[in-house]
Amino acid sequence: ATGRFHQVRRHLAGIGSPILLDSKHGDTRVHPAWRERGLTRLFLHLARLQLPALGIDVHAPLPPDLDAVLAGAGLQVPPRVYGLAPSA
């Protein structure tokens, strides 16, 4: 793992939002439940990157494996994550 990747993991854990399946900084008590739902890797994804000064606004949907894990848990990514207005 790179230093930057470790920084992200440590920062997220420090603000109370550890990455799922992070055995170093996460809550290992919840790992078995997520593994049963099919999670096989760290649940880390950049959904949106905005660089307004450069006119960049890029969206990336969840990869199929992570999307399937959420769907299996009855969850979904809120539209606001992608900069979309919630549906009425």
Image (tube, rainbow, N blue to C red):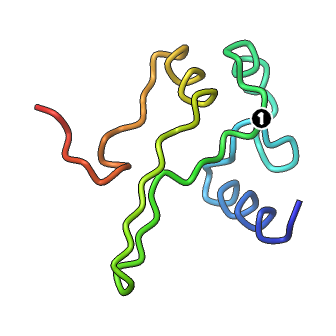
From the viewer's side, name the closer residue of 84 and 58: 58
Image vertical order of residue 9 relative to residue 81, above or below: below
Residue 41 x/y as whole percent = 77, 35
Image vertical order of residue 12 relative to residue 22, above or below: below
- Label 1 is placed on what type of residue? Arg
Q: Give the crowd class for mark 1: few <14, some 14-19, many >=20 residues within 10 Å.
A: few
How many dots with numbers?
A: 1
Residue 43 x/y as whole percent = 67, 39
Q: Residue furthest left?
A: 88
**Residue at left offset 47%, top offset 42%:** 61
Residue 74 x/y as whole percent = 46, 16
Image vertical order of residue 35 relative to residue 84, above or below: above
The quarter of the rendered structure image containing the N terminus is: bottom right
Is 70 on the left-hand or right-hand side of 7? left
Dot 1: what SS?
Answer: loop
**Residue at left offset 68%, top offset 47%:** 18
Image vertical order of residue 27 relative to residue 84, above or below: above
Is 47 on the left-hand or right-hand side of 23? left
Residue underneath mark 1:
41
The quarter of the rendered structure image containing the C terminus is: top left
